[in-house]
Amino acid sequence: RGVRPHIPSSSRAACEATLFDISPAMNEAMTSIESIVALLTALHPKRIDLSLDRMWRILAALGHPERQLPPTIHVGGTNGKGSTIAFMRAILEAAGLRVHVYTSPHLVRFNERFRLGAKGDGRLVSDDALADALGECERVNAGAPITVFEITTAAALLLFARNRADVLLLEVGMGGRLDATNVVDRPLVTAITPVSFDHAEHLGETLGKIAAEKAGIFKPRVPAIVAAQPREALAAIEREAARVKAPIKVAGEDWTATEERGRLVYQDDAGLLDLPAPKLYGRHQFENAGVAIAAL
């Protein structure tokens, strides 16, 4: 969703012909998934436009894969979303569960955004499977306006619905209320990592407005886990939780995660856990791990 790759000048019709000719085994000339993403970017050069209307339209055309997902944990916030999801995945997989994961952006390969659950450990989606899913989404979208992140998210939901797993860890792309991932009616739990100034041109000029957008993933009667927040952000998050009647548990009030003598000590009403330090580097990872434990 950041820098657009360079695409040789060509007509829209030529781009569409190339995309729709992709076979399940991929065109021999198309050697990487990045080539498909480049074509999609050429077809859909829209700037970010926060709305769920386009997602509802394409999901309906796909047969509503968002209604066929495994139990879902939805994670929003500004900082630490990826780390929190990594901790949850490690814990769940250690317990023998199959875990789907959707994150963004990727570090090296586009496929990193899509992890399919399997016994013992997951695997990144293959180029062929991802190409097929993206191609199917492009066909049913039939040239209607849509952003690349939206069509990518639709492909992810399609893949997750068609492959069995015990849990789906779903990371918000930007904001929350109008983010393309906010189409799951009733997740198991939602989580908000620390909020800071983030995409103010889209989410609002104040920390309170940004936090309210992030809290837009809250659902009625679905528990919400909230990391330690600046006062203004926490007030907005608590107002949103009260509005939709989502029970929340806040770091420092309902649970704590601290470093003590090089170990992670987590405590809530159920008791205390004395755990090894997180493998991810940095004192802030103790807090991220705490959010993961509280959510699970």
Image (spheres, rainbow, N blue to C red):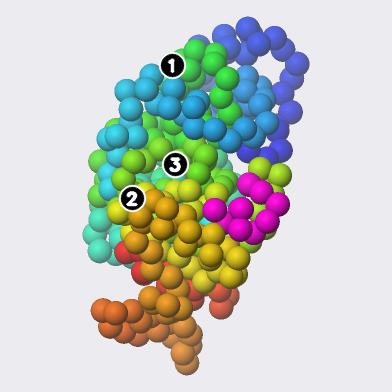
Kind of residue sitting beneath label 1: Val
Q: Real-space Cα distance between discs 2 and 1?
A: 32 Å
**3 or 1: tag closer to the N-terminus:** 1
Left/right of residue 219 with respect to residue 229 in the rendered view: left
Q: Real-space Cα distance between discs 3 and 2?
A: 14 Å
Within 10 Å of the Cα at label 3, are there few (<14), some (14-19), or many (20+) other Cα atoms?
many
**2 or 1: tag closer to the N-terminus:** 1
238 vs 19, nearest the viewer: 238
- Residue identified by numbered label 3: 182
**3 or 2: tag closer to the N-terminus:** 3
Residue 278 visible? The answer is: no
Circles 3 and 2 in contact, beta carbons < 8 Å: no
Query: Residue at the spot x=60%, y=65% of the render?
Result: 232
Give the percent coordinates (x, y) of residue 254. Answer: 38, 76
Give the percent coordinates (x, y) of residue 45. Answer: 67, 25
Residue 168 visible? The answer is: yes
Image quarter where the N terminus lies is top right
- Residue identified by numbered label 1: 140
By secondary structure, the bulk of the magenta-drawn segment is best described as: helix
Query: Residue at the spot x=57%, y=9% of the render?
Result: 17
The numbered mark at residue 220 is 2
- Location of residue 60 (image quadrant): top left
- Location of residue 51 (image quadrant): top right
Q: Which residues are magenta?
A: 203-212
Give the percent coordinates (x, y) of residue 118. Answer: 29, 48
Kind of residue sitting beneath label 3: Asn
Would you place residue 8 above or below residue 106 in this image?
above
